[in-house]
Amino acid sequence: MRNPLIVANWKMNGSLEAIDQWVKEFTTFNPLLTEMVVCPPFVYLNDFRTRLLTNALDISVGAQNCSTEEMGAFTGEVSAGMLSDTGCQWVILGHSERRMLYGETNEIVARKAVQAVNAGLKPIVCVGETLEQREAGKTTEVVLSQLNSILDAIGAQELSKGALAYEPVWAIGTGKTATPDQAQAVHEALRVGVESRDSLAASALRILYGGSVKPSNAAKLFACADIDGGLIGGASLKASDFYAIAQASVVPDVIS
Ligand code: PEP
């Protein structure tokens, strides 16, 4: 059985004051069995991690991006090795905002995944279709081509040490969520895609759903057979909402 994984993507939000507040609030909640990762902006990784350690919170830290390169003359870039150096264990790659706003192609995302794996980071690889692609009946084709380019670059086993996140572009930050049936169908297709390369890796791989997940819709999504947790944007900025979403991922037989 796969232990649920809930990841917070803070995007370009937050401040030292907001981090203090978030951590302070989180310390008032009971510990959960669910694995949790928070991905703040680069500049706050260390501050956030220090506060987690000081307060003995069992949350890992991840980045939202890394460079395609290992080191050198790449002004403004941050390498996977540097992230690892600061105590980061995870990195989100191929988020649709990066694909759409910064021109990240499947090839670029794959190169970043290689850097992440080489530096010992666990990649959280995002895939997802636009509304236009969904309406054209191309959802499976699009997500499988995004997945296959990652599998070609790092292999199924390395991917299964991290996670895959299905994030329909039309559901990110829009308040529109895929129905549990819509999400489950894509998650199943993705798992079958990984299975065609390596069945053990496919059954170990956590496939997260992302796109307007809130405390009110999380439990129904997480109850689906192939949905192993969530990648949470807006709702993760509020500690109580992020906690409530993580709580919704706890399966009843684990609670008892
Ligand atoms: C995201 O940015 O990965 C995301 C899922 O955002 P939101 O939850 O706000 O839709």
Image (cartoon, rainbow, N blue to C red):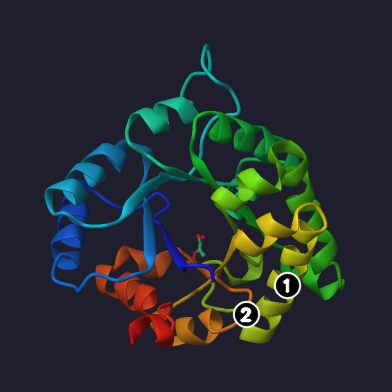
Amino acid carrying label 2: it is: Ala
On the rendered image, what quadrant is the C terminus found in? bottom left
Task: Name the side, left or right, on which 118 lies relative to 138.
Answer: left
Residue at horizontal 63 percent and vertical 33 percent from the top = 114
Pinpoint residue 20: horizontal percent, then vertical percent: 15, 54
Q: Label 1: which residue? A: 188
Q: Are marks 2 and 1 in contact (CB under 8 Å)?
A: yes
On the rendered image, what quadrant is the N terminus found in? bottom right
Amino acid carrying label 1: it is: Glu
Q: Nearer the viewer, residue 172 or 58?
A: 58
Q: Earlier in the sequence, mark 2 or mark 1?
A: 1
Q: Label 2: which residue? A: 225
Q: Secondary structure at mark 2?
A: loop
Q: Is residue 239 visible?
A: yes
**Mark 1 surroundings within 10 Å by alpha-carbon count, few (fewer than 14), some (14 through 19), many (20 or more):** some
Residue 69 to residue 173: above or below: above
